Amino acid sequence: MKEFALIKALRRLLPPPGPGVSLGAGDDAAVLAPRGRPLAVTTDTQIEGVHFRREWLAPAGIGGRALEVALSDLAAMGARPRAVVVALQLPARLPGREALALMRGLIARAAARRCEVAGGNIAVYEGPLALTVTALGELPRGAPATLRSAARPGERIYATGLPGLARLGCEALARKARPTPYLRAAIRKYLAPRACVEEMAFLGRSAPLGAAIDLSDGLAGDLGHVLAESGVGARLALEAPADFKRACAALRLDAQACMLGPSDDYELLFTAPERRIAPIAPAFARRFGRPLLPLGLITPERGLWIADAAGRARRITARSFEHGA
Amino acid sequence: MKEFALIKALRRLLPPPGPGVSLGAGDDAAVLAPRGRPLAVTTDTQIEGVHFRREWLAPAGIGGRALEVALSDLAAMGARPRAVVVALQLPARLPGREALALMRGLIARAAARRCEVAGGNIAVYEGPLALTVTALGELPRGAPATLRSAARPGERIYATGLPGLARLGCEALARKARPTPYLRAAIRKYLAPRACVEEMAFLGRSAPLGAAIDLSDGLAGDLGHVLAESGVGARLALEAPADFKRACAALRLDAQACMLGPSDDYELLFTAPERRIAPIAPAFARRFGRPLLPLGLITPERGLWIADAAGRARRITARSFEHGA
């Protein structure tokens, strides 16, 4: 397909703009109507070979995943997705139908999120398939964004899902492991993450939160950002679930290292006083089909500490798990 | 430089957020304060080898150019730049200091435009240097965006600068032509375009415009978009300036084809009734140091027509100049 024909075909995929978007794709820029709320803005690039592999994920899944990954950053701020713009970098050899399938997947996830695909850009080049999704989201009126810098000593650390599960799924794919039902769920978690938009809306309505961040680098890395920005430390008490431990052992992975190291979970990590979370935790679990996981405690002393197998406190840094360190 | 160290160093370059940005880079998302005006949003990717060559442009120039190219789309809508977010794709082999110089160049141009660099994303990969700039701009209260679809028969077609000049500059570089002063200006036009933000603000204040688009694909292509979206046609009367013709001839380029074909001018093309433009044209020329160029007339009959050397009308299409057609 010629580049101009492909651009036309891609544009035809977009549904007409919904309320709040005065002008959709097709002009020099899209236009959003003002609605009097603070607007969160985030941009994220997903690149073949770095963030995903085409042999693991069909084009529609690549598009949907890129959308959810961008929305995850909005969720971490407590913002509701409003619109995205999408910059595609298509390898010259990529069949046009794959580009179309990718955008269809992205548009379907955006529709499920009631988020407009307001515009985009297409470049054909010699390089890996890449998508940059810039997402705009609204903060609730009167509610401040949940910042990385807002963790306070005494608050407990929670996650909306198990850190490291996506890493397990990724390793299972890389090693072509025989997929048990548990591994299948881990693989799904890795390939088709879901931004915690509704989870965060529920939490924000139910309890005053401290800091929040999405788990995209892994627990040690992302919690490390929160600690550094907040000027505090943390003591972790990690208890890996038995089935996670078993699955890790079968792949000769250390379960605790998996929970701490790089993992694309796109769950939320947040801090809050335990007494505010305890009363709402059962409702959270009922509503979202998974419990809030307590991971440890924010401390006034700097540093990230974890108890080892013998119960001794060991200090770790984000660097312990840094890519390429 | 390690990836995390580079990210830190890049973040340190950003000035603190100015008014209108509640939260700058460094968290999951930036936050813009609401200001009650429609927001134009556009995204654009510039890729080494496709949109620029590193041997022609220092890193700071690459960053500044990407910023201006994104703002050009805002200008075409009549919007004032407010903030950008920048997604960098850095080749693994790129020295850290070049990435820093690139961002410094981008930040300097943004500062000159009073536009915040509100956040970004960095990915290191095996591929060409690429930057995706997503720009957010405000429309003046009560003023509609200038759309591609708003050209009406009888309106005259104008450009804020000579279409094809950037193409001439690009060809001069590619052929390593001996640079005359005129060629030097053309090369500057190609390497360091300036978005017509102030030009458009002046025009929008001074006269009711019809359609507008920025000249990024070339005159035939971009005017073709306006004609298609507006359901009208145009008759062009192009008169290449004598020095442009001479410079084209020296490079064995057809001046008219240069004016019509692909060229990254980032000037604005707009339509308006001649009687509204004539009174303000002298003030425009004084203020911006170059005249408004009348290029032809919008007609009710579809199609894009141009007079050939013998004065015969010849029909052309965007396709005549399509990349890769």
Image (cartoon, coloured by chain):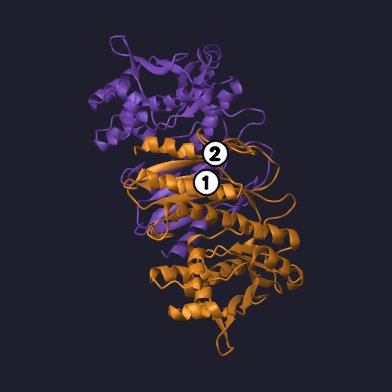
Chain colours: A orange, B purple
Instruction: Specify whether residue B184 is in view.
Output: no
Give the mark nearer the N terminus: 2 vs 1. 2
Disc number at residue A107? 1
Give the position of the N terminus of chain B as an image quadrant.
Answer: bottom left
Of all residues, the one furthest to the top in this rendering is B311
Separation of residues labelled 2 and 1 (CA atoms): 9 Å
Is B132 above or below relative to B162?
below
Report the residue at 42% width, 65% height from top: B2
Instruction: Identify which amino acid the numbered label 1 is placed on.
Output: Ile
Is B291 above or below relative to B75?
above
* Residue B123 placement, left or right of A73: left
Circle 1 chain:
A
Task: Classify residue B221 by image quadrant.
Answer: top left
Disc number at residue A15? 2
Give the position of the C terminus of chain B as an image quadrant.
Answer: top left
**Looking at the image, which is closer to me, B268 or B283?**
B268
Instruction: Specify whether residue B111 is in view.
Output: yes
Report the residue at 74% width, 72% height from top: A278
**Would you call the spot at circle 2 few (<14 residues within 10 Å), some (14-19), or many (20 or more)?**
some
